[in-house]
């Protein structure tokens, strides 16, 4: 008889509970996005969860979030998290920084992205009564760095006819590079200088004379 009374009381409470007042389990983040290796990735995220745990044999109990987890390539985030975030075991040296809270913000920050960080990330909520993991996840793709090579600029010079020297002051970093053979003419000769960026600038004096072979 006592169980019947409790069951009736619970059913009455459910019937009189305002429709839509208690949110469902839900997490919201983008389906996928792409970041550059070495940069910082921010995964915007928000979540909701029921505020009341309904039970047949006991009065409804309030739910509160006690743990949040971000995991990579795991369906339920049950296993130890090695590439992600766990509020129960935060590492100060981790590149995964939780910018959210235990109320509704689950934004995650990943610094110095590596190629191995490319994965499908899921968010898990654990309350005092039950846990839930967002089923879809967000796919993070990591692209390679832009080539750390140099910016190339070819500078063409027209030298005066033979017998008339040219003295020109050039700033570094002009460097000689392999180039097609010059095509001399009776009046003008063509030279190409290779501009290489990223080096320390210093002034250097090049004396270019039309009578020299030159480089």
Image: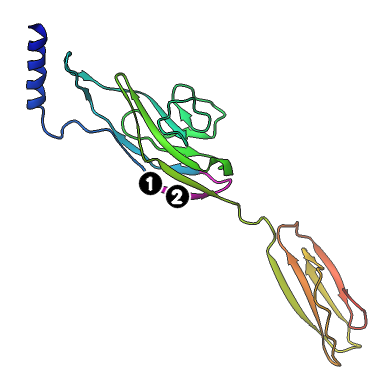
For residue 7, above or below residue 200: above
Inspect the magenta stretch and tell me whether residue 200 lies in it. no
Quadrant location of residue 197?
Answer: bottom right
Quadrant location of residue 65?
Answer: top left
Inspect the magenta stretch and tell me whether residue 33 lies in it. yes
Q: Is residue 198 left or right of residue 94?
A: right
User: Nearest the camera: 18 or 4?
Assistant: 4
Position of the C terminus, as image quadrant, is bottom right
Q: Is residue 37 left or right of residue 1?
A: right
Position of the N terminus, as image quadrant, is top left
Q: Residue furthest bottom?
A: 186
Q: Is residue 188 left or right of residue 43?
A: right
Q: Position of residue 28 (x, y in %)?
A: 33, 41
User: Nearest the camera: 157 or 116?
Assistant: 116
Q: Position of residue 212 (x, y in %)?
A: 93, 79
* Secondary structure category for the residue under label 2: strand
The structure residue drawn at horizontal position 23% and vertical position 26%, both measured from the top left corner, is 51
Q: Rounded to the nearest whole Å, what is the CA distance between mark 1 and mark 2? A: 7 Å
For residue 202, above or below residue 64: below
Q: Is residue 167 left or right of residue 110?
A: right
For residue 127, above or below residue 110: above
Q: Which mark is residue 136?
A: none
Q: Position of residue 154 (x, y in %)?
A: 72, 73
- Does the CB distance between marks 1 and 2 fall below 8 Å? yes
Q: Which residues are magenta?
A: 32-40
Q: Which residue is mark 2?
A: 33
Q: Is residue 53 visible?
A: yes
Q: Which residue is mark 1?
A: 30
The structure residue drawn at horizontal position 35% and vertical position 35%, both measured from the top left corner, is 134
The structure residue drawn at horizontal position 69% and vertical position 58%, both measured from the top left corner, is 149
Quadrant location of residue 123?
Answer: top left
């Amino acid at each position: 008889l006592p169980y019947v009374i409790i069951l009736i009381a619970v059913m009455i409470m459910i019937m009189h509970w305002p429709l839509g007042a208690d949110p469902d389990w839900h997490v919201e983040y983008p389906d996928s996005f792409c970041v550059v290796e070495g940069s910082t990735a921010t995964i915007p995220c928000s979540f909701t969860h029921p505020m009341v745990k309904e039970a047949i044999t006991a009065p409804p109990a309030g739910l509160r979030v006690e743990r949040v987890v971000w995991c990579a390539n795991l369906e339920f985030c049950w296993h130890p998290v090695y590439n992600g975030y766990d509020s129960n075991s935060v590492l100060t040296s981790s590149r995964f920084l939780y910018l959210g809270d235990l109320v509704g913000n689950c934004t995650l920050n990943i610094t110095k992205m590596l190629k191995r960080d490319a994965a499908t990330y899921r968010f898990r909520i654990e309350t005092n009564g039950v846990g839930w993991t967002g089923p879809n996840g967000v796919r993070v793709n990591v692209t390679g760095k832009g080539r750390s090579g140099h910016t190339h600029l070819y500078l063409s010079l027209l030298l005066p006819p033979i017998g008339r020297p040219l003295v020109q002051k050039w700033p570094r970093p002009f460097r000689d590079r392999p180039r097609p053979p010059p095509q001399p003419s009776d009046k003008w000769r063509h030279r190409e200088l290779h501009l290489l960026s990223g080096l320390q600038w210093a002034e250097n004096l090049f004396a270019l004379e039309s009578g020299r072979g030159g480089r």
